[in-house]
Amino acid sequence: MKLRNITSFAALFLVLMLALASCRSSKRGMKEQEDKTQPTITITTPAEKEKKQQEEKQGAVAGTNFTARVRVTVTQGDKNVTTNGALRMRYDEVIQITLVDPLLGVAEVGRLEISPDNILVIDRINRRYVSASYDEFAALQARNINFSTIQELFWREAQKSDALSYTLPAKTPIRLDLKLSDKGSNSNWTPHTSVSDKYVKTDANRLFSSLLGK
């Protein structure tokens, strides 16, 4: 995988999260259908109820921060590339992922910023970006996925595990492996990025279609 393709990482994060969210949504729908046809009675003790309520409240306060270092490996066929970056989330406001040059490990090459009303993907090497509402993404519309859907998945998965792996069905399947470290709640970061007028805006669906080879 060539260096220039490292800028696809941010887009890959989004596409893979959408695929996983869609899968989880389908499974949830199937479970709800099963529950309707086969009703069950669950007895919950007061201690279990309190524990469940505390778990549901974890990270559910608007403005709560979650930060971590991220090591990402993308594998497609017999090619792979690994780089580092950062994951920053501010509950109910933004999910931000930045990725750096895998050779020098300093310069930022890609950024993904998911907000309640907008998705921003920045390709710093080719000086292009995508900034679009959820309605402008065909994949999002087809799956009824919004910021809350993505946040629910991302927030839970990132806090629960230090190693995450996802596979995206494409012309040649793409595997994404993430390792999280230095988890914290630092609030000293800028949640929303301004794009320089030197960058060219790109169509969202065209960017992801070319990424997946479809």
Image (cartoon, rainbow, N blue to C red):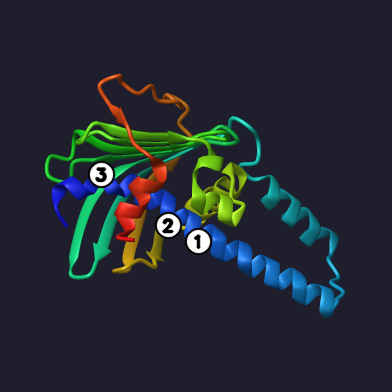
Which amino acid type is marked by label 1? Answer: Leu
The answer to which of marks 3 and 1 sits earlier in the sequence is: 3
Indicate the secondary structure of the residue bearing disc 2: helix
Question: 10 or 64: nearer the eye?
Answer: 10
What residue sits 62% from the left and 52% below the top? 144
Task: Reply above or below: 129 against 102.
Answer: above
Residue occupied by mark 2: 16
Image marks 3 and 2: residues in contact by CB distance under 8 Å: no
Residue 159 at least partly seen? no
Residue 75 x %, y %: 25, 63
Q: 159 or 101, which lies in front?
A: 101
Q: Residue at 20% of width from left, 56% of height from top?
A: 81
Report whether 66 appears left or right of 177: right
Q: Position of residue 153 (x, y in %)?
A: 55, 53
Amino acid type at image mark 3: Thr
Q: Are marks 1 and 2 in contact (CB under 8 Å)?
A: yes
Q: Badge 3 is on which residue?
A: 7
- Asked which secondary structure carries label 3, the reply is helix
Q: Position of residue 83 (x, y in %)?
A: 23, 49
